[in-house]
Amino acid sequence: MSTVTQQTLQLLPEYQERYLKDLLANVYSVDPETGAVSGIASYNPLMGQPVYQTDAEGNVLTDAQGDPLIEFQRDAAGNILYDAQGQPMPMVMGGVPRPDVMPFTPAQQEAIRMGVEEGIGLYQPYLESAESAVSRGIEGIFGGGMGMAERGAAALAPTVSARYTPEMAQPYYNQYVEDVIGATQADIQRQADIERNRIGSAAVQAGAFGGSRQAVAEQELARNAARQMADTSAQLRSRAYEQAQSQAQSVFENAQQRGQNAAQLYGQLGQGIGALGSQGIQGGTTMGALGEAAQSQFGTDIDRLFNLGLAEQSQRQSEYDVQRAGAMEEAYEPYQRFAYMSDIFQGVPSAYQNLSVAPTPSPVSNILGGAIGFQGYQQSQGGTGILSGLM
């Protein structure tokens, strides 16, 4: 039985074949003589091609190790340009800048420095002053104020428990009263003696000396003199006693008043010191609040400064990202163009040419085919086969 083999060969029109070859040659090509690789797929579009320093004749300059010297980007004045990290920017042909994050701006760095070096513990001096003021205030209230109050209570206590008694007048009784009484009685007695002598003289003149009338007159004189002495002595003693009582009462009342005045004065001093202590506590509280406000305001200033730097950093980051996106589009534009050209090529209908070949088998081939088949069978059964010497 004869076998028919069909082969189908797809051929492109000449213009499509030339189009495809040119397209592939521009994508990737190897020089058969030098082995140099060219085409857009022969290099990384992200990296670009570095530019090296050359001499006046166009030869690439090298360093001591033989490595080519890279050319760096420069401004109009010829100064080397640096990237955001402070590294010199090499000059490249094409390529895309690396993904990068903009570093902290000077404003952000200053805000961080202020926060670390100046902001931490800014409230501490205010807190210490507040603590000192509160301590002095408490000491003034419980030390000075209470001390003065205790002194006032001590000065007032005797005035509360003290009672006036008549015996208190004894020290103020005039010790010369008895001398006055004695002198007064002597005067009365002398006047009585003078009167008795007069009565006696009158009785002698009347010739009744030693009579009953003289005796009655002398007795009446003696009784009057004794009564006058008693009355005068009683009046003097009473007056001296009243003066002593009055003076003692005045001294007692004055002492009571002084005690009360001292107690009131100590109380007022205690209240004044306590008020100063309260003001000290209030001042300490105000100082603490001032420290808290200063800390908070300083933090606000730091935040404001950092946010200003953040706005600048964000702007620089946005500008860098836009530039990188533009460079990315520029780097991949050839690939998009070739992809577009490839799409055009794939969208063009292709022409096919079919060639059918039906060879006639010879007897020799039939024999060889049968031998090969039998050879396989024998080998599967463990034999060597008839063609083992040939194969």
Image (cartoon, grey):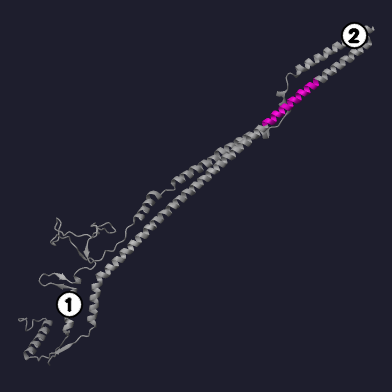
Pinpoint residue 243: horizontal percent, then vertical percent.
74, 25
At mark 1, the secondary structure is helix
Q: CA distance from mark 1 to mark 2?
A: 191 Å
In the rendered view, does 278 fall on the left or right side of 37? right
Height in image: 202 above or below 99?
above
- Residue at x 90% of width, y 9% of height: 200
Residue 250 sits inside the magenta stretch: yes
Which picture quadrant has residue 255? top right
Foreground residue among 123 and 316: 316
Most common secondary structure along the magenta stretch: helix
Residue 299 as seen in the image, left or right of residue 220: left
Which amino acid lies under the numbered mark 2 shown in the image of this protein?
Gly
- Mark on residue 206? none
> Which residue is pictured at 16% across the width and 71% down the height?
38
Which residues are drawn in magenta? 233-255
Determine the secondary structure under disc 2: helix
Name, please, the residue furthest toward the bottom.
Answer: 1
Whether residue 157 appears in this view of the structure is no
Q: Position of residue 136 (x, y in %)?
A: 51, 41
Task: Give the labeled residue for mark 1.
Answer: 22
Within 10 Å of disc 1 (Cα), the crowding (few <14, some 14-19, many 20+) is few
Image vertical order of residue 370 relative to residue 319, above or below: below
Q: Quadrant of residue 109?
A: bottom left
**Crowd around label 2: few <14 · some 14–19 · many ≥20 (10 Å):** many
Label at residue 200 = 2
